[in-house]
Structure formats: structure tokens, C-alpha cells
Amino acid sequence: MFKATAQACANIALIKYWGKRNQAFNIPATDSLSLTLDKLTTTSTIEFSDKFTADTLSLNDTPLIKDARLTMWLDIVRKKADCTQYASVSSTNHFPTASGLASSASAYASLTVAATHALKLNLSIQEQSDLARQGSASAARSLLGGLVLLPSGTDPQGKDSVAVAIDDCSDWDIAMIIVVINHGKMKSMSSRDAMNHCAKTSPLYQCWLDTTSSDIKQAKQAIAQRNLNTLGTIMEHNTFAMHGAAWASRPPVRYATPATIAVLDSVNELRKQNIDCYITMDAGPHVKILTTHKHIDAVENRLKTITGVTEIITSGVGKHAALV
Ligand code: PMV
């Protein structure tokens, strides 16, 4: 039977990638460094069969119409396995499916494990990473647990743009608070479209590319020294550099809402009270706060007073993706 189920955790990039060096193989233009999160998981089941007449996807038990991106990715998997059968895919996110909450990372990571198992492809973790990246670049990182580096690499087909686990954080008390913010009427642009638009039109895009390698270097040092303050400070700088480049696109790409800004202000205030907490943001209005377990209550209590914050999810460090 060509069927398997797997689960993967989402990840949040502390040092982001934003822009691709190759579209066909979906290779990021810069290295990125992320934290895998145990509270944000996706379970995916995939079945390949002659009885199917098309690829189908159901997300959180709701059947979706054709997903062109998924079919393109399934074609890559099928080619590797010499398979001609269509697939039925069903994915469940155990967290709100919202832009900027990295659901494509955990979705494609869980699908990679499930699909390669279903088709009995005996791939190395590097080959799985290469495959996951072609679905969603951040998915390559979700195959692994703890702190994970995804290099941009130099290979034209991205064979060296595969994720590496750099620290399992077993001796480090770090946590991430996901602050879900109501989108209101705002229609968000997907990360894929937004980064391509930014690369094409923003005069700050090259500055953004130039800043990342030193951010990665400093972040790795801070991790080795278990220095949350240095890591958090670089993470914030990196987020604002990415969003600054996005704001300077024509037309601008802007994700922050008034509630987003209120959360940023609160984090600044909390830091003045010696509470170690630092923000990062992706392609959506939500804010992710890096902190330690002892500060969680203080941060959550402050967040609960902010209008527009609809949910607070506190997560620890997640492990690698696996078959269920
Ligand atoms: O690979 P995608 O399409 O999930 O894009 C991820 C983009 C960011 O979340 C903004 C940055 C990152 O490195 O995760």
C-alpha cells in the first residue's frame, strides 16, 4: 500500500531568508537560521493510487480545489520514484492556519517524510531536505529539531542548500510566544510573492542581502555562548532589515497592523523591566517573541491587554519530523 502519515513541527526563522537565488529549484538567496517549535505541528497523510484521477488536497478536513504548487512538488516526488499515480493528500494543522505562521514549513516537511516513505524512496536526510525545500524553502528546516541552519549554498540545483541541525537546545531554556493578531480587512501577500516583488522593486533589497551573513555569524556565536540578549538583539535587527526592505518595495509590502506595533512597544517596555524578550515577524501581522520560561507569565499577561491580539501560543523547542 502506497500510503503513509507523518508529523512535523513548524519553525520560526531567527535570521530570515527573503528572496531566492534560483526560482526553479526554490533556493534561498541567503542562509537562514530557525527554531523548531513543539506546539505548532502539522500531520499529513498521503496516498498514491491508480484509483485517483487527479491529485487532491484536503486541509483541516476541508477539500480544496486544485493546488498547482502541490502538484508541481508531487511531480518531483513521482519522478524520483518512477511513479505515475495521482495522490490524495490530507493535512491537519494543529494551530491556526494563518499567513506568517509557517504552516507551509510543517506541511511540506511532514509531506516529505510521508511521501518518501509511501513510495519506498530510501532518501538520506540531505536528499529529503532538498525535496522539502522545493515545496517550501522553510520546510527544509522543519525536517530537523532545535536550532537549524539552511545554507543558500552554491550548487546550481541546490544540492548543498540542505538543512543542518546546529543545536538541540537540550541545555538551554528558551521558549517562543506566538502572538496571533487579527488581520482585519487586510489582505496579506504570500511570502513567496512578497519576496519576489521585494527583490525586483526594493532599492533596499541588496542591503538586506548584504546584512544577513554577518547576522548569521553573530547569531551562531550568541547561541554557542547561550547569550539570549545578543541573539535576541540580532534577531530583531534582522527582522527589521527584512521588513524595511519590504516597505521600500513599489508598491510597499507591509504586514504590521496597529496591534502588531502595540506588541512591539510592549516588548520594549518589558525589556526595560529586565524581562528578556525579543521579537521577530514574518509574512503576516503576527509577532513571535523569543524568551525564557521564567518570563512567560509576565509576557503573556502584558499581551492579554492588547486589543487585536486574538490568541497566544507558547511553544518550547520542537523535534525532527517523523512518521506517525
Ligand atoms: O519558504 P516560505 O515560503 O515559507 O517563506 C518563508 C519566509 C519567511 O518566513 C519570511 C522567512 C523564513 O526564513 O522563514
Image: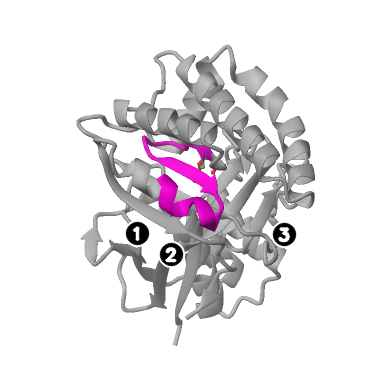
In the image, residue 260 lies at what x, y percent?
36, 31
User: Magenta segment, which residues?
Assistant: 278-299
Amino acid at the residue labelled 3: Asp
Q: Quadrant of residue 233?
A: top right
- In-image side of 265 versus 22 (left or right): left
Q: Which mark is residue 95?
A: 1
- Residue beneath label 2, please? 41
Q: Residue furthest front?
A: 273
Given residues 87 and 191, the one toward you in this image is 191
Q: What amino acid is at disc 1?
A: Phe
The residue drawn where x is 24% and y is 67% is 61
How busy is the neighbourhood of tag 1: few (under 14 within 10 Å), some, or many (20 plus)? some
Give the farthest residue toward the bottom. 1
Q: Is residue 201 visible?
A: yes
Question: Measured from the top left, where is residue 250 in percent x and y?
Answer: 44, 13
Residue 102 relative to residue 183: left or right: right
Residue at point 51%, 36% (across, down): 273
* Number of numbered markers: 3
Label 3 sits on residue: 167
